[in-house]
Amino acid sequence: MRAKGHERMDEMKGAYYTKQYRNVFAECGHSQEEIDAKLKDAFHTVFYGAEGEKFYFEAGDDMGYFEDTGNFDARTEGMSYAMMMCVQMDMKNEFDRVWKWARTYMYMEDGYNKGYFAWSCQTNGTKNDRGPAPDGEEFFAMALFFASHRWGDGEGVFNYSQEAKNILSACIHNGEKEPGDPIMEPENYLIRFIPSRKFSDPSYHCPHFYELFAEWANEEDRDFWKKAAQASRDYLKKACHPETGLAAEYAYYDGKPYPEEQDVFGRHDWYYSDSYRVIANIGLDYEWFAPDDWHKENNNKVQKFFMETHRDEDFMTYEIDGTVLDQPALHPVAIIATNAQASLAADGPYAKECVERFWNTPLRTGERRYYDNCLYLFALLALSGNYRIW
């Protein structure tokens, strides 16, 4: 994928150090005009497109939300994703609307999960549950820090940096002085699936975020986040299969797929919806920090799995060893998008082909469009050099 004028990140230290972000689409021969138009059109479709295409909705004069169109709710996953997308695209109005909706309806001021956000709400703001999904908290905090650095802090809930610090403090310290549980495991620095359960979700692991939290969180928490970054990188090496590179949706702290037997969470020991985000995160960690060559090796394996073994087949559900299960993938466009974003690290024979396949794939329409198109927009940002540290 080398192109004149576009150095590979493995020849540098990562964008955190160099302030240079790869434009992988340009490396593949696309013009900047084409790239800019594709990015602009996709964001317009998701935020302001037609019914059946958009999933951003304004609420009143100063709020807005992303709707999970397959489940008819608003989730911290999507709300925090929307904020990250908006800060990357300099969409402050939409960012503030989404943040105010989340802070108004999702935030838990008291109780066992004080300081966290209810993972699912009805679109009228009514909480469906009073438990958090920890990927929401980490994306909220990261987006808020970026907003602080890009636009400056405001007052109240728009004091972005203070709000981010408060979230991260809760993630570490909840349960120390009153009933509650931390999101981050105090014994091994790994993020929990939910605060009360001691196992993880590999797709929650964002060591590239933790590196930045180690600089911007409350002073007393910074060493924890630095250790969390290394712990997450070590964990992903255990959770990703040594031959296929695939990770399970949920996994124990030793990386073994969860559960050993069926339980209340159902089956999540396979490569299914949550799992697709793992290689995208690995790609972005490599783009920002280039910590080691394992990132390249793992993402090369995943691309090889899909391009050599399943190139011309419909996407299915898979065991992490590659065994095909008789269940179609719920989010096929998400697989295409994350296989492409994996090319931020991957340097094998399929890196360019995965990017081109994504380039030629349209946004998903219909009721299941929300999750696919969230990962689609992140891949567009990342592969165009616009998923940046602010």
Image (cartoon, rainbow, N blue to C red):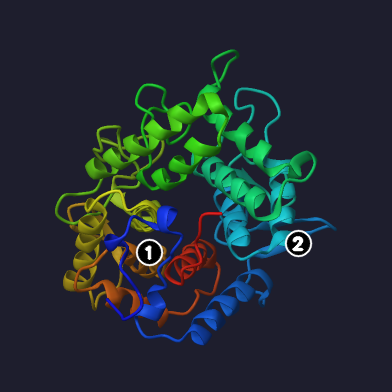
Q: Nearer the viewer, residue 366 or 384?
A: 384
- Is residue 235 rendered to the left or right of residue 97? left
Which kind of residue does numbered mark 2 sit on?
Answer: Glu
Along the horizontal axis of the image, is 311 left or right of 389? left
Q: State how far apart marks 2 and 1 are (Cα).
A: 28 Å
- Specify the farthest residue to the right: 61
Q: Position of residue 159 (x, y in %)?
A: 73, 41
In this view, the mark in front (2 or 1): 1
Above-or-below relation of 266 to 24: above
- Coordinates of residue 312 in the picture (x, y in percent): 24, 78
Compared across the picture, whether 116 is left or right of 6 comes to: right
Whole-percent x and y of residue 295? 26, 54
Where residue 379 sits: x, y (%)? 44, 66
Find numbered disc 1 in the image and state the secondary structure of the residue it sits on. Answer: helix
Report the residue at 23% width, 41% height from top.
238
Read off the residue under disc 2: 58
Q: Residue at x 33, y 35 (%)?
A: 231
Q: Which quadrant: the C terminus? A: bottom right
Question: Which image quarter holds the N terminus?
Answer: bottom left
Q: Residues within 10 Å of mark 2 (few under 14, many from 20)?
A: some
Q: Residues within 10 Å of mark 1 (few under 14, many from 20)?
A: many
Above or below, comparing residue 203 to residue 280 in the picture: above
Question: Total number of numbered labels?
Answer: 2
The disc, 2 or 1, on the residue closer to the chain's N-terminal end is: 2
Q: Is residue 101 left or right of residue 270?
A: right
Res 53 visible: no
State whether residue 365 appears in this view: yes
User: Which residue matches tag 1?
Assistant: 338
The type of residue carrying mark 1 is: Thr
Identify which residue is drawn at 65% across, 41% down.
161
Query: Which disc, if any, is residue 4?
Result: none
